[in-house]
């Protein structure tokens, strides 16, 4: 997974990165945004526009944020609460709209407000 959105995005969801992404691979959960690693082309357009610096290449994610590498994958590969099947790789967030649910890690995470 080239880029990862970390905990500083929780409860912020500015969505500047969504608008900047040329391949539409950033999906909107309830409290956080998620990058689909299979759709991301590793261009880096999302990283500099994030106002809270929550986006990083996976190999540069700080130790205390490492759990978000797997969590971004979980968002797409596991069945999330209220859904019948995993999101998978639908080909862009504009096709799915806001997902409106988060992974268990994000759902239980303290608020960043």
Image (cartoon, rainbow, N blue to C red):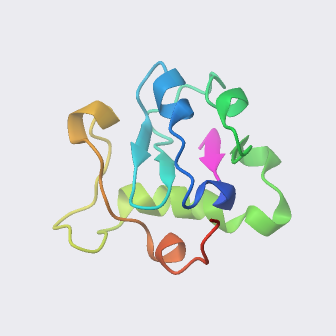
Residue beneath the point at 23% across and 41% down? 96
Residue that sits furthest to the bottom in the current view: 108
Q: Horizontal placement of 62 versus 2: left or right?
A: right
Please tell me whether residue 98 is drawn above or below residue 47 in the rendered image.
Answer: below
In percent of width and height, residue 78 lies at 35, 66
Give residue 18's position: percent from left, percent from top.
47, 32
Farthest residue to the front: give it. Answer: 113
The segment highlighted magenta reads: 1-5
Tell me if residue 108 is in the magenta stretch: no
Outermost residue, left direction?
Answer: 84
| Residue 1 percent across, percent down from the top left | 59, 44
Q: Which of the two residues, 8 or 34, is positioned nearer the viewer here?
A: 8
Query: Residue 29 versus residue 73: which sits nearer the camera?
Result: 29
Left or right of residue 96, residue 24 in this image: right
Identify the residue at horizontal 40%, vertical 28% (top origin): 24
Q: Which image quadrant is residue 56 in? A: top right
Residue 4 on the magenta span: yes
Considering the whole magenta stretch, tell me its main secondary structure: strand
Q: Quick check: 12 left or right of 52? A: left
């Amino acid at each position: 997974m080239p880029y990862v959105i970390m905990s500083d995005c929780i409860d912020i969801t500015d969505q500047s990165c969504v608008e900047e992404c040329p391949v539409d691979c950033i999906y909107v959960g309830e409290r956080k945004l998620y990058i689909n690693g299979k759709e991301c082309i590793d261009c880096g357009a999302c990283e500099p526009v994030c106002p809270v610096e929550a986006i990083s290449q996976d190999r540069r994610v700080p130790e205390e944020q490492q759990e978000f590498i797997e969590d971004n994958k979980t968002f797409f590969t596991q069945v999330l609460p209220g859904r019948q099947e995993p999101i998978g790789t639908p080909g862009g967030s504009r096709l799915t709209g806001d997902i409106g649910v988060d992974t268990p890690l994000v759902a239980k995470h303290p608020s960043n407000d």
